[in-house]
Image: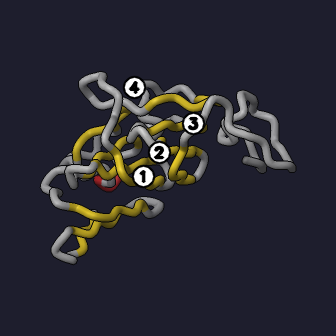
Amino acid sequence: MWGYNNRGQLGNGTTTDSDTPAAVTGLSNVEHIAAGKEHMLALKTDGTVWAWGYNNYGQLGNDTTTNATTPVQVKTATGNNLSDIVEISAGEAHSLALKADGTVWAWGCNTNGRLGDGTQTHSHTAIQVIGLSDMTDITAGGRHNLAIKNDGTVWAW
């Protein structure tokens, strides 16, 4: 990664900007990446999700609000590692994941209800979006989200 790095969003263990590409520290076997405003996500081939960068709302999902200059593993509210993930997406200050079972999980900033749990309380760990099952695709906008259900209908929150 390269570019602006004031919050550790390059994942190289520093907050120094870089004008040339450099590897993210400690990541391998990655099959998908997603970029938020100042935080990043990686989905590994084992179905786990890793995040780094700015964490003021808990958008890294590691049960803190501390910025991370290297990848940290996303956890659920029960303290388990988020697993069986097939797709990820990053919004401005929140993150989404689609599990293999068709459920959608969210964490980070919940202003305007972007975590889909019926509240506006921020979450520092991944929580399941209420009422969504059999989903096949997700995408996070800056402050909203979309998902496609297996019957072709589109859901937004």
Report x, y in % for residue 121.
29, 40
Q: Amino acid at mark 2?
A: Leu
- Residue with the mark numbered 1: 88
Between residues 136 and 72, which one lies in front from this camera angle? 136
**Are the residues at dot 3 and dot 2 in contact (C-beta closer than 8 Å)?**
no
Q: Is residue 43 left or right of residue 149?
A: right
Q: Amino acid at mark 3?
A: Trp
Q: Is residue 57 visible?
A: no
Q: Of the residues tagged 1 and 3, which is closer to the observer?
A: 1
**Are the residues at dot 1 and dot 4 in contact (C-beta closer than 8 Å)?**
no
- Residue with the mark numbered 3: 52
State whether residue 60 is above or below residue 2.
above
- Residue with the mark numbered 2: 43
> Where is the C terminus found, in terms of image quarters?
bottom left
Counting residues from the start of the chain, the first of labels 1 and 4 encountered is 4
Q: CA distance from mark 1 to mark 4?
A: 18 Å
Report x, y in % for residue 117.
21, 47
Counting residues from the start of the chain, the first of labels 3 and 2 encountered is 2
What is the crowding at mark 3: few (fewer than 14 residues within 10 Å), some, or many (at least 20)? many
